[in-house]
Image: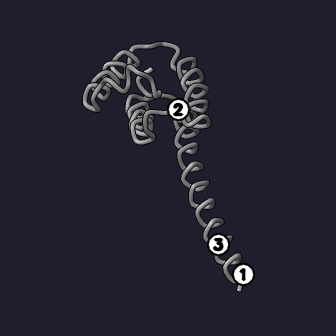
Amino acid sequence: MLLRKTPLSKKLTLDEIEGKLKDVIVILKYVQNKDVFMRYHKSHLTRRLILETSAGNEKEENLVNSLRDIGMPADYVNKLSRMFQDIKVNEDLKEKFKRTYRTENSLAGK
């Protein structure tokens, strides 16, 4: 709820959201089945990223880094990090395609 575009996340300031996420991280330190949480988090993160309903990629990346810091399974955390890398690569490719398309169309129009 905190990382999704919702009325609640819009009412809270960035500092309030970060404070609540830190509280969640503290609780996660004591969770026995960290892999269950990570599978759940991965599926919801994937949905937020694909549907672009995330409150912000920076907040999401900060949470992933916090998960790494508290000792969550490395393979899960690395998969989450790769999602953000893939998004950045995708954005770069889209921009490059748009520039190339515009250039080729302007040359063909002459």
- Left or right: residue 3 compared with residue 49: left
Compare residues 91 and 63 and report the one nearer the observer.
91
Q: Under tag 2, what secondary structure?
A: loop
Residue at 43% across, 30% down: 67
Of all residues, the one furthest to the right in this rendering is 108
In the rendered image, residue 88, in percent from the top left (x then y), is placed at 54, 53
Please name the amino acid that badge 1 sits on: Gly
48 left or right of 66?
right
| Residue at the farthest left position | 15
When the figure is inspected, residue 82 is found, relative to residue 24, above or below; the finding is below
Q: Secondary structure at mark 1?
A: loop
* Place of residue 64 in the rendered image (x, y in percent of width and height, measured from the top left): 45, 35
Q: Amino acid at mark 2?
A: Thr
The residue nearer to you, when weighing 45 against 69, is 45
- Front disc: 2 or 1: 1
* Image location (x, y in percent) of residue 28: 41, 18
Instruction: Locate residue 59 relative to residue 44 in the image: left or right.
Output: left
Decide which of tag 2 and tag 3 comes sooner along the chain.
Answer: 2
Q: At x 48% / y 13%, what residue is drawn?
A: 32
Classify mark 3: helix, strand or loop: helix
Q: Nearer the viewer, residue 95 or 62?
A: 95
How much space separates mark 3 and mark 1, taking CA atoms? 10 Å
Compute the Cα span from label 2 to label 3: 29 Å
Q: Amino acid at mark 3?
A: Arg
Left or right, 31 with respect to 39, comes to left
Q: Is the Cβ of the residue at disc 3 closer than 8 Å to that at disc 1?
A: no
Of the residues under marks 3 and 1, which one precedes in the sequence?
3
Residue, disc 1:
109
Asked if 22 appears above or below 106 in the picture, the reply is: above
For residue 53, the mark is 2
Q: Which mark is residue 102?
A: 3
Q: Quadrant of residue 98?
A: bottom right
